[in-house]
Image: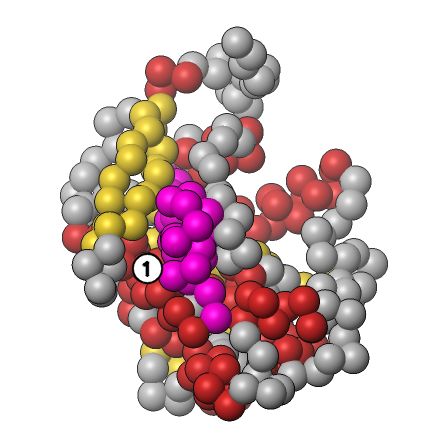
Amino acid sequence: MKREPVLPGPDGTPFDPAAYEQHRVWATADDGIRVPITLVCRTGTPRDGTAPFLLYGYGSYGISTDPSFSIQRLSLLDRGFGYAIAHVRGGGEMGRRWYDDGKQLHKINTFTDFVACARYLAREGWTAPGRLIARGRSAGGLLMGAVANLAPGAFGGIVAQVPFVDPLTDVLDPSLPLTITEWDEWGDPLHDRAAYQYMRSYSPYENVSPDAIYPPILALTSLNDTRVLYREPAKWIARLQAEAKGGPFLLSTEMSAGHQGRSGRYDAWRQEAMILAWIVATAGADRGT
């Protein structure tokens, strides 16, 4: 009923929807649950592991990550990338149980689902681990930090925007404005030992491994973010730089922005252009399979 207008490309070529194809595929998680993946790519994209891919995930608060059109995404697709959304547990895509199976003492399912989706894309020839970039923001940034620890070899790079990577510190502090309501999502580690131990087991900051070889990581934060304080990604990146192998581990801090990043259309586009440039350069690096 309505189609968003798209201007011609830099070379003057008109936008052609028929130049792209979309798919719904399913990965199998560690416990046998089938996890849906939505993906889009240029028509005729090879299935031999040579195509770079961006895999996005969120998986918290029962929020559904519905597939939608994005002009920004065309910049990647027209460079040969595929783009995929992992509809992991903790989101709401498959109903209330899908959410309940990815929260509190079941939160690990969110992370292992995402890893299963990444491995499926590589196994089926959509891409290869060295050419697969993972991306998430906020609670999806927690997802990025967790999968970096769980399966660093499954990714060629990770983008974590305003990432909730030190959750135990903040959820233990009821003086923060969001903490008490957050106990419904993560559990109450202040009064429940089981919740504390469980969060401790997956907290990205707490579980950085000195033995693993991590992919390049780009973390982005904002000085005025009141939801995920800038100290979280700053601590995380500092620990990765000090203790972990691989990388590089980079931190970009917006000095006058909040949780949503730069305000203003052009500033937001410039920030996105920087992120996409990093993704293209990282996926193009020769990191093998």
Which stretch is magenta?
81-104
* Outermost residue toward the top in this view: 1
Q: Which residue is mark 1?
A: 113
Horizontally, is 264 left or right of 180 in the view?
right
Q: Quadrant of residue 232?
A: bottom right
Q: How many marks?
A: 1
Q: Position of residue 99 (x, y in %)?
A: 44, 55
Horizontally, is 68 left or right of 269 in the view?
left
In the rendered image, residue 168 lying in the magenta stretch gets the answer no
Q: Quadrant of residue 44?
A: top left
Horizontally, is 209 left or right of 69 in the view?
left
Q: Position of residue 16 (x, y in %)?
A: 43, 15
SS of the residue under disc 1: helix
Q: Is residue 175 visible?
A: yes
Q: Position of residue 120 (x, y in %)?
A: 22, 52
In the rendered image, residue 87 lying in the magenta stretch gets the answer yes
Q: Which residue shows up at 33% across the image and 29% down it?
A: 22
Q: Position of residue 278 (x, y in %)?
A: 51, 54
Q: Quadrant of residue 179?
A: bottom right
Q: Vertically, is 9 above or below 215?
A: above
Question: Quick one: 80 or 114, which is closer to the camera?
Answer: 114
Horizontally, is 212 left or right of 144 in the view?
left
Q: Which residue shows up at 31% across the image and 44% down it?
A: 36
Q: Amino acid at mark 1?
A: Asp
Image quarter of the C terminus: bottom left
